[in-house]
Amino acid sequence: MGVLWVLIAVAVVVVAAALVYWTLLLSMYPETLRTNEVYAVVTNDLWRLRVCRYRRGRTEGEPVLLVHGFMANHHNFTEPETGCIAAYLAKKGYDCWAVDLRGTRSSIPPFEHNITEPVFDDFVYRDLPAVIMHIRKTTGYARVHWVGHSMGGMLLYAYVQAHGDAHIASAVTLGAPIGFEGTNIRIPDFVVRLVRLFPAFAGALQRGFVPIGFTFGIAQGIFPINLKNVHPDLRVEHLFNMLESPQPHVLEEMAFWTKTKTFRIREDSIDVIEGMKKNMTTPLLAVFAGQDPFVSAEKGEKFINSLPHQDKAVLVLSKERGAVEDYGHCDLAFSKEGEKEVFESIAQWLEAHPITERVALFEGEEGGIRTPLKEDERVGILSGASYAHLREETPKEKPAKAPKRKATAAKPKAAVKKPAAKKAPAKKTVASAAKKQAAPPKKKAAAKPGGKDKATP
């Protein structure tokens, strides 16, 4: 009986210490936003998603959609302020839109729903179409550029198979797995069960480990990151606020894909990998890390080069290819030489694929008549975040001028030829950044998905 009381006392002390520790972390590392504007985009099933806009002043540059990875949020692209993708592209004149997908702390589920419900298809069929429509309507551009890190890149591949790429001007994927071929990564069943039963606890455990792991330099064994390659201004609070609790159903799907080496959506009815091999036409720059457990740079490069269209390029960031370090999965977004080795190539790729159509035509309208650009709902406060430092005024949209010619659907951009010499061609620039870049596409590799069609988690 005495032993039982001792165990209970120890448990109480541990729980109390954990609560104190967690309370201290929340007070020490509050979320900071440096965005121009914050919007709430409502999906067709009534989820409210936070979308943060980053641009220089009131510039009307081409819109870039930034899509974060699994167990992350939009801070994936906005930290540190001195070395992040959003700040770099905004300086180049682009209008950056960074989304927090459903299930993140800032998202608000509809009545009688909760943030642990999302599945991968929700991102593809509900969140991203709503966000892209919102950006098109707000900016007046017919299309957007897409930059996705990790799962954000996988979502690009899935989105194009589900909806086509009529609204995508160009895309950049950073460390995006392609069916997990060539990797030994496995998600243990006990981890999936733990997250399914206690998602909030799993998220708190992961975020709570960040200060300890990065202070004592042991985080590299837990997170897929090269600590020698992170930006010097990246601090613990940035990573603490960047991380999200794992989504139970999405984790189950990821576990299934890593086990079977497949990538299927819509209840297994769409094989994303096979679809890309047959009909991928989106202008694509695929960036891979030399040391990435989630995607083999060699396999990824071979797959991208095997795609049927010509408007594509591969950048591998490793010492062997001329990079300062062998990049890890996470530091692709915030490396110490990110501006020179990653961001510059992204900007050049976007510049080589300009969005020429400013009139956003919305489907379902008779005769392709334009919808007047109304001001979208501006949200000053969403749950879990303070936006007191933001400007209070809502930016006014300039009304779009009616086109003189008869309105027609936006023409697909002519197959982007190798950009002329006024600026170094994107493909060649990307190639020079890593010494030797994507060779001309080889004959289609006979890569097969490694699993059955059924048994979706």
Image: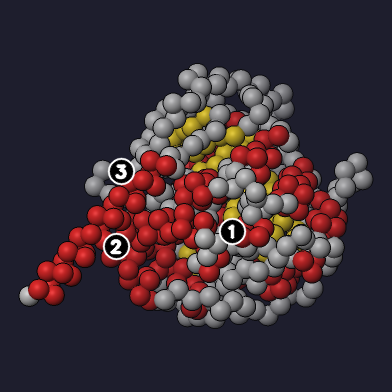
Check disc 2 and give the amino acid type: Phe
| Residue 229 in which image quadrant | bottom right
> At which x and y percent is residue 91?
71, 34
Check disc 3 and give the amino acid type: Pro
> At which x and y percent is residue 28?
42, 42
Q: Nearer the viewer, residue 217 or 321?
A: 217
Figure coloring: secondary structure
Q: Residue at x 30, y 50 (%)?
A: 20
The residue wearing badge 1 is 330
Per the model, the C-alpha gap separating discs 3 and 1 is 32 Å
Per the model, the C-alpha gap separating discs 2 and 3 is 21 Å
> At which x and y percent is residue 18?
30, 56
Label 3 residue SS: loop
The residue wearing badge 2 is 198
Q: Please indicate whether residue 367 sits to the left or right of residue 339 in the image.
A: left
Mark 2 or mark 3, which has the lower sequence index?
A: 3
> At which x and y percent is residue 209?
43, 59
Is 17 rendered above or below residue 420? below
In the picture, which quadrant includes the C terminus? Answer: bottom left
The residue wearing badge 3 is 110
Check disc 1 and give the amino acid type: Cys
Per the model, the C-alpha gap separating discs 1 and 2 is 25 Å
Q: Residues within 10 Å of mark 2 (few under 14, many from 20)?
A: few
Label 2 residue SS: loop
Specify the farthest residue to the right.
Answer: 421
In the picture, which quadrant includes the N terminus? Answer: bottom left
| Residue 303 in which image quadrant | bottom right
Q: Please indicate whether residue 438 sits to the left or right of residue 378 in the image.
A: right
Mark 3 or mark 1, which has the lower sequence index?
A: 3
- Residue 212 in view: yes
Q: How many marks?
A: 3
Q: Please indicate whether residue 130 sits to the left or right of residue 14 in the image.
A: right
